[in-house]
Image (spheres, helix red, strand yellow):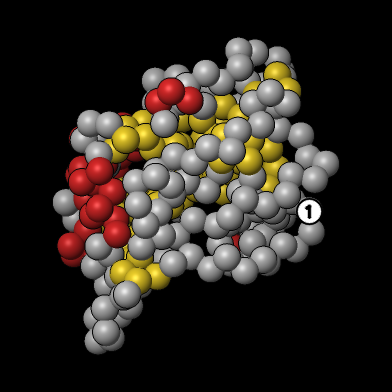
């Protein structure tokens, strides 16, 4: 048995995530700036199993690791990253690209420390959170990802945590940092509509063996009958009248890499 992500609708208004990104209708916005990642490896703190996925958490009491530029006003402080995956290698990403899914999706979560005092406060405001989404495509073993996977046995059950320090998060970013961006929501409860989404257009690799390690995590506590996190991706939500902007005038052309 295992956890399959709930497909119940929890739409609050009309700005829910994830969405299908239609590359033909995404609008090039020449005013969008290149993203600026400034991550300090020493701010990495721990890995924790939160029941529906695992979080790699960072010390976020000061602006040592921040994201700025791109579509953002000011800097956003890094607090954690996590992954979404599926029960097989065929799907698992939350965002779709022209109706296609990747095997997994990385979410790097930041909050607006220029205007707010904590993630909890920031999540109550439309400009409070910025999430960078990175698609994972099947390929060679990802060395940066492997250093995380080697620790997952220590957090196999819900609530377990282990120290995880000196991690170079830039190793999980692709070379090409062009992106799509739109306004949306958290993809887990309480689905607050507080997120500036920044979806990178180039994917990074993951091996089938690495993905299998994700599915060995349990959504149950140590003293419960084991149940595994087989998938944890939310279905796409209506775009409605939102506009998806692209930092690059060239149309996305990497679908042969799915």
Q: Quadrant of residue 35?
A: top right
**Looking at the image, which is closer to me, 59 or 8?**
8
Q: Is 106 situated above or below 176?
A: below
Q: Is 188 situated above or below 58?
A: below
Q: Residue at x 57, y 34 (%)?
A: 97
Is residue 57 in sight in this rendering?
Answer: no
Q: Is residue 169 left or right of residue 239?
A: left
| Numbered marks: total | 1
Mark 1 residue element: loop
Is residue 131 in sight in this rendering?
Answer: yes
In the picture of the structure, the residue carrying the numbered disc 1 is: 14
Question: The C terminus lies in which quarter of the figure?
Answer: top left
Q: Residue at x 47, y 46 (%)?
A: 93
**x and y, in percent, of residue 37 in the image:** 46, 30
**x and y, in percent, of residue 102 in the image:** 44, 39
**Looking at the image, which is closer to me, 85 or 62?**
85
Q: Quadrant of residue 48?
A: bottom left
**x and y, in percent, of residue 254 in the image:** 47, 21
Question: The N terminus lies in which quarter of the figure?
Answer: bottom left
Q: Is residue 212 left or right of residue 30?
A: left
Q: Residue at x 64, y 58 (%)?
A: 123
**x and y, in percent, of residue 128 in the image:** 65, 50
**Looking at the image, which is closer to me, 32 or 212?**
212
Q: Is residue 72 left or right of residue 163?
A: right
Disc 1 crowd rating (10 Å Cα; few below 14, some 14-19, many 20+) is: some
Q: Residue at x 22, y 50 (%)?
A: 149
């Amino acid at each position: 048995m295992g956890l399959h992500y709930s497909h119940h609708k929890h739409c609050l208004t009309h700005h829910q995530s994830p969405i299908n990104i239609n590359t033909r209708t995404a609008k090039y916005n020449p005013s969008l700036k290149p993203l600026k990642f400034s991550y300090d490896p020493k701010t990495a703190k721990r890995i924790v199993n939160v029941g529906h996925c695992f979080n790699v958490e960072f010390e976020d009491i000061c602006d040592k690791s921040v994201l700025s530029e791109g579509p953002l006003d000011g800097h956003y402080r890094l607090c954690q990253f996590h992954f979404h995956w599926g029960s097989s290698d065929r799907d698992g990403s939350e965002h779709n690209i022209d109706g296609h899914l990747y095997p997994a999706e990385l979410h790097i979560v930041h909050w607006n420390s220029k205007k707010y005092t904590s993630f909890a406060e920031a999540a109550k405001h439309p400009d409070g959170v910025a999430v960078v989404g990175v698609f994972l495509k099947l390929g060679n073993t990802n060395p940066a990802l492997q250093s995380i996977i080697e620790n997952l046995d220590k957090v196999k059950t819900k609530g377990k945590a282990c120290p995880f320090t000196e991690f170079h998060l830039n190793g999980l970013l692709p070379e090409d940092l062009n992106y799509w961006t739109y306004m949306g929501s958290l993809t887990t409860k309480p689905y607050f509509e507080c997120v500036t989404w920044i979806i990178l257009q180039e994917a990074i690799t993951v091996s089938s063996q690495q993905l299998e390690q994700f599915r060995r995590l349990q959504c149950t506590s140590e003293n419960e009958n084991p149940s595994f996190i087989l998938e944890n991706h939310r279905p796409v939500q209506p775009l409605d009248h939102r506009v998806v902007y692209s930092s690059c005038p060239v149309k996305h052309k990497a679908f042969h890499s799915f």
